[in-house]
Amino acid sequence: MFFVLSRVSCAEAQPALRWAGDPEGGAPFVESDPSHPDTLVGFDVEIVQLIAKALGRKPEFVNISFWNIDQSITRGDAELGMSGIEDTPARRATMAVTIPYYEFREVLSVRDRDASTYRALADLRGKSVATLAGTMAYEILLRAQRDYGVKPVSYEDDVHPYSDLALGRVDAVLLDNVLAERRKKTIAGFTIQPQSVAIGHYVGVLSAKSEPLRNSINEIFRTAMRDGTFERMFRKWQVWNDDQPKLYAQLLDGKPVEPVIGFDTASNDATKISKWEAAKRYFPSLLQASVVTIALSCLSMGLAVVIGVLIATGRVYGARPVRAVLLGYVELMRGTPILLQLFVIYYGLAAAIKLPAFAAALIGLALNYAAYESEIYRSALEAVSVGQLEAARTLGLSQRQILTLIRGPQAFRLALAPMTNDFVALLKDSSLVSVLTVLELTKQTQIFATNLGSWVIPGAMCAGLYLMMSLPVAALARRMERQWKIES
């Protein structure tokens, strides 16, 4: 098959091989070349080039977030997904998965001073252990949470778990040995424990209807195993080890390879039960994540209102220098992405102050929304008629009395509707704080969908929970508006 495909006539127009990967923190799988940022490098990049050459096609990269690669492949955005993707029962049940091309080990990393204390997950009772959400390692930590009382902390990249380990924000990291060894070259202060927690494999993923292409890729992989192409490739990236010859011998002998070795996935694999049964099991975790979302949103909005009122008051009544400073703050917060602000508060300021993830998320959302709230309150204050203000001054009321008795109450009524809209928007924007390891509703839903292999049921449940949180707020605001109309 391989040789037939290799001799595709150049005269025949072959479609490009669209493949999906994530270069963000994707070393050494898929990453931007530091010397040439427009060029992708990594062993997965080279494997795709090998596949495309054998098929007589030109590779075309599609930049997809790691968490969305499976869904993008299923909907046809790309034919092949390659980005350090793990072989799992869920993927085997819902997609066309290639044979494994690399065997990795899930390893535990701890700070140097804890190396003799934390040798296994059982030693980390009550301690926080970081990993990537939606991965095999995360499922292992969920089991360890039940068995040993470990506290899983999920990240969206493989860099910050190790930097937070060095900073003392987490007590350990559980990830692939490829990632652990890569990060140890740039981040000092942690030790990789030699004992493997589990063994897994990297694979390519295709849509379920692409089995013929998957079979062709499998033949290409087997040839690369036989002729030493994979060995040369992995040696170049310094990830070759004695695990790979054993894996290749097993595959070339036609023996099946289990997706996960050393970890019982029976109780964690949502594809082995009905989707509704899986939904019932995951629903309590979604409710718990909803509580985090509600608490974070309410606290952030409350703080934003207080700060916004102070800013608006300062811009209306303050001296020119005060107004200039406050205007600068408002434009800064409105003119930069909230995601960037969250990163700066949590990671950028870590050298000076190590804020807990929830506190950093609360402060970040509050400071951002305070800028928007201040504009609402300022415009509402200025909307009160000048005639009323002059009449109040004629009656001898002080500026404070005018603000608290006349201008403020009317401004609040005018600001109520946009305030309600902002709170609903804040409920949704709270999903961004997952980048700071806060496990809120959207992130928990994403993990559920990844394990289930479908977004239909998890997405519907998530949307329903968001509606249950936002609709009562809107109803309360409408009731208050009606009551004020009657009173006025």
Image: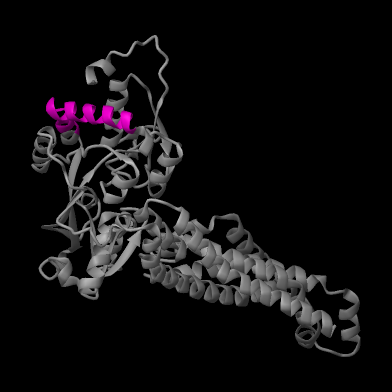
Q: Is residue 90 above or below residue 170?
A: above
Q: Main secondary structure of the magenta part?
A: helix
The residue located at (17%, 56%) in the rendering is 107
What percent of the width, then of the height, locates residue 140?
A: 24, 61
Q: Is residue 486 above or below residue 266?
A: below
Depth check, front residue: 406 or 91: 91
What percent of the width, then of the height, locates residue 336?
A: 56, 55
What percent of the width, then of the height, locates residue 337?
A: 54, 55
The residue located at (24%, 76%) in the rendering is 126
Q: Quadrant of the C terminus?
A: bottom right
Depth check, front residue: 277 or 416: 277
The residue located at (28%, 67%) in the rendering is 170
| Residue span colored magenta | 211-233
Q: Is residue 210 visible?
A: yes
Depth check, front residue: 316 or 461: 461
Q: Quadrant of the N terminus?
A: top left
Please indicate whether residue 234 sits to the left or right of residue 406 in the image.
Answer: left
Q: Quadrant of residue 117?
A: bottom left
Q: Is residue 220 above or below residue 371?
A: above
Q: Quadrant of residue 128?
A: bottom left
What percent of the width, then of the height, locates residue 458?
A: 45, 59
In the rendered image, residue 117 lying in the magenta stretch gets the answer no
Please indicate whether residue 148 sits to the left or right of residue 360 in the image.
Answer: left
Q: Is residue 150 visible?
A: no
